[in-house]
Amino acid sequence: MYVGRLLVVASGIGAYRVSSRSFPNRMITERAAGTLTVGPTPDAPETDNPYVAYNCARAVGDDRVVIGNGSHVDPIAEKLELGYPARDALATGLLTMDYEKDDYDTPRIAGVVEADTAHVGIVRRDALLVRAVEEPTLVATYEHDAPEPFAFEATDAQAAATAAYEFDFEHPVCAAGVSIAGDTAELAIENGPDA
């Protein structure tokens, strides 16, 4: 089953995965300390598509990480830095950026991972959903486009990235994992076997 981009969040752990049929030549890099960026591989064909490159994970201080499938990750992180609660930062960022205006009306998905809590959100053409979650929760751009419980047992950022890359959904491209260990945000990358 093809679900497009996806993320899973729970207290202290989360992961984001790029799955793509149209733009598979992408990878995740650490652009700056605490920020992971999706972008084209060196051999990728040129494109003017504004949705191909973006920050997919951004630490906010040492105890929170925002993950998501587009340019809305930065405004959500900025709202957290201003003191907004996670729910409000997600709702404001997703509502402001809205769903992607591409051929598929692709939803924007995002999550905020903290040591003891997690929140997940999606903005689709027909809805904005933001929820606090108490168990691992998945949301994807297609098919699973409402938050739902999901089996996920990773305990650190690298295990989360690897597990997300290996989820049984079609067309994996790359993945990021995040965890909050004590008061430290950890980020990890899985760019697949050919990276």
Image: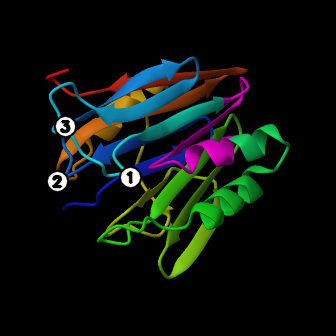
Residue 70: x and y in percent read 47, 49
Callouts 2 and 3 close, C-beta under 8 Å: no
Q: Is residue 20 left or right of residue 153?
A: left
Give me the C-alpha separation between circle 2 and circle 1.
14 Å
Amino acid type shown at disc 3: Asn
Q: Quadrant of the C terminus?
A: top left
Residue, disc 3? 25
Residue 105: name its quadrant: bottom left
Is 66 part of what is drawn in magenta? yes
SS under mark 2: loop
Q: Which mark is residue 187?
A: none
Amino acid type shown at disc 2: Arg
Residue 169: x and y in percent read 22, 52
Q: Residue at x 76, y 58 (%)?
A: 88
Give me the C-alpha separation between circle 1 and circle 3.
17 Å
Q: Residue at x 17, y 48 (%)?
A: 171
Residue, disc 2? 21
The outermost residue toward the bottom is: 126
Q: Quadrant of the N terminus?
A: bottom left
Location of residue 18 with respect to 64 vertically, above or below? below
Of the residues tagged 2 and 1, which is closer to the observer? 2
Q: Residue at x 52, y 48 (%)?
A: 71
Q: Which mark is residue 6?
A: 1
Q: Is residue 155 visible?
A: no
What segment carries the magenta color?
60-77
Residue 55: x and y in percent read 49, 37
Q: Is residue 46 left or right of residue 132?
A: left
Amino acid type shown at disc 1: Leu
Q: Is residue 2 visible?
A: yes
- Of 175 and 156, which appears nearest the observer? 175
